[in-house]
Amino acid sequence: MRAVSGSENGYRAALDRLRAAQKPSAGTPLYSRLVNRPLGRRFAAFAYVRGGTPNGVTFVSAACTFSAIALVALLPPAWWLGVIVSVLLVLGYALDSADGQLARLRGGGSVQGEWLDHTVDAAKVLTIHVAILVSAYRFFDLPAVWLLVPIVYLVVDSLLFFGMMERDLLLRTVPSGAGAPPASSGIVRAILILPSDYGLFCLIFLLLGFPPAFFAVYTVMLVCNSLFLALALAKWYRQLGGIAHG
């Protein structure tokens, strides 16, 4: 029988601790629930036994994500490019989950780390659609009017991100139990909100070598996310309207 090293024992123990301390799955889309969090958990456990820090993991996540975004803007679409971009984005997203999980393993995160994580996320939201816009302008054979799609998607994603961050910030100021009601954790809801999942968005780049198919799926996702935004804004407005300031 093969001997188990101390680092392997440490990794398994860290993994078990993370499994026992997972955030609730309520309101989480299917990909994030079934793929991204478990993958991030393994990265977090590995970083923990290697002495990594949450901010260090955030920087590695950013390096993967923004390398992929740069490739989309700079290189002509090709099947192999789509694979590389998708893999880098998936890794970046998993590491984005890992930094928070690593912080919990180490006894809690910091305000600085939370700020860094959200700043990187904001930069990702702002730049990924710009990269698609640049690629579509340079390499896609599309009527000019279709260039509005990534511009509108940028607005929709930005509103979703900043609206959610602001809602969460305001809910932190209310007494415990007076905030938003718990979201449903059912599998049907997780499937229905899948188009809003960034993990699924990472996977559509596998179609990058086939520009018509990629842009068609990208446009469908914009429509789905626009509907999701309208519903989310109305829901958040009602939630916050029921909270009285002290």
Image: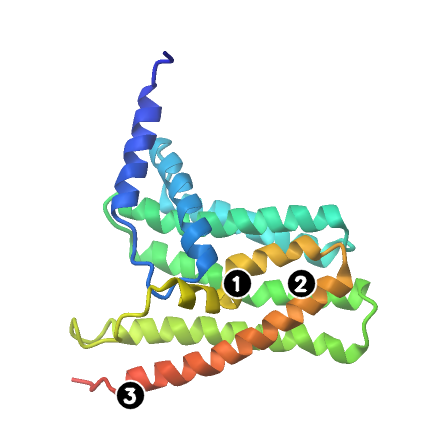
Neighbour class for label 3 at 10 Å: few (<14), some, many (≥20)?
A: few
Circle on res. 131? 2
Q: Residue at x 37, y 31 (%)?
A: 50
* Amino acid type shown at disc 1: Ala
Q: Nearer the viewer, residue 30 or 55?
A: 30
Where 8 sits versus 106, above or below? above
Circle on res. 241? 3
**Direction top: furthest residue:** 1
List the residue tagged with mark 1. Answer: 123
Neighbour class for label 2 at 10 Å: few (<14), some, many (≥20)?
A: some
Task: Name the secondary structure under disc 2.
Answer: helix
Locate the N terminus and report the quarter of the image it occupies: top left
CA distance for labels 1 and 3: 30 Å
| Badge 1 or badge 2: first in the primary sequence | 1
Question: In the rendered structure, are the residues bearing label 3 and label 2 in contact, judged by CB atoms less than 8 Å apart?
Answer: no
User: Is any part of residue 110 visible from this angle?
Assistant: yes
Q: Nearer the viewer, residue 231 or 7?
A: 231
Q: Which of the two marks, 3 or 2, is nearer to us in this view?
A: 3
| Badge 1 or badge 3: first in the primary sequence | 1
Residue 12: image location, x then y, percent: 32, 31
| Badge 3 or badge 2: first in the primary sequence | 2
* Amino acid type shown at disc 3: Gly
Where 90 sits versus 144, above or below? above
Q: Quadrant of residue 27?
A: bottom left
Neighbour class for label 1 at 10 Å: few (<14), some, many (≥20)?
A: few
